[in-house]
Amino acid sequence: MPARVPETIHALVPALRATIREAAGLAFPHYRAGGQTNARIWSKTGGSPVTEADVAVDTFLKIRLGALLPAAAWLSEETADDAQRLGADLVWIVDPIDGTRAFLTGHPDWSVSVALLCEGQPVLGFVHAPVHDHFYEAVAGHGATRNGAPLRVSAQSRLPGARVTGPKPMMDTLARGATRDGVKPEFVVVERVPSLALRVARVAEGSIDVGLVSSDARDWDLAGADLLLREAGGSVSDLSGTPTTYNRPDPVHGSLIALSDGLREQTVAALARG
């Protein structure tokens, strides 16, 4: 990670905070708690859904973030990829609505996720969960907060008793690998969080100990939240414990784990055994 965030970038934080809240305000009128969105919906190649709210937020952020930092390249879920980003020192990575299926069915766990990479590493990270009114932000080397309060991963140091969430096949693998002398660990199973960015943010705030992520996540799902977690005492890594990297030619990831530094060794070992 760069030794320090340039002051010109750090100074953008108040404007970014306001911009992301404004962007979420474009989506919120289309959200119906517990019910179907009133936004128009269509399917992208591959079958994943997109709504007019996703596109509106993406367009708004591309214009506004581009104006704030014209030198930065762009990578987002709803914009055609431009290979120019691969040679750029600064790159915005954006998911206008992370957890679109949650958004369109009235589940509260969706978010707006924004990260800025500098020299390939996230140096600014934001995850805004409008329904919960939770605004997470991080600046590399300056900590992470939720609504202004500092974030810190939980003090849980053992897998037995850990609060775990994620896809069931990965949770089953973890349980098998953590079984000792025929005794399975008693995890506290947390309901799966549909927004990956929000799942990682909750590890950073200490309400989840281990967040499991199945393969096929993209940079825009993770980059902003990963910085939150790094600043709070953890990281997103692959199943061997290698930290996640961003802005590669193919921004797709394999299976991942989000957890505190204190649980990494045990969790990596258990997944390997499972």
Image: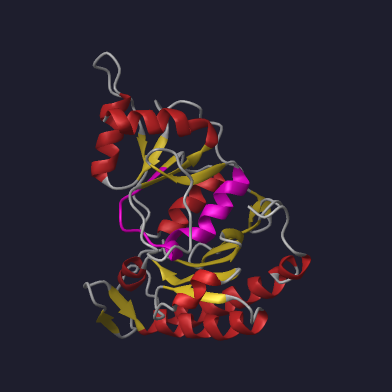
Q: Which residues are magenta?
A: 211-232
Q: Give coordinates of residue 114: x percent, y percent.
A: 54, 68
Dominant SS in magenta: helix
Q: Residue at x 71, y 52 (%)?
A: 3
At 25% across and 36% down in the image, what residue appears? 172
The image position of residue 82, as x and y in percent, is 44, 79
Numbered circles on residues, count:
0
Q: Dividing the picture into quarters, in which one does residue 217 lie?
A: bottom left
Q: Nearer the viewer, residue 253 or 208?
A: 253
Residue found at x 74% / y 64%? 6
Residue 80 image-quadrant placement = bottom left
Instruction: Please tell me which residue lies in front, 220 or 249.
Output: 249
* 235 relative to 39 in the view: left or right: right
Q: Is residue 111 magenta?
A: no
View extreme (right): residue:
7
Confirm whether residue 93 shows in the render: no
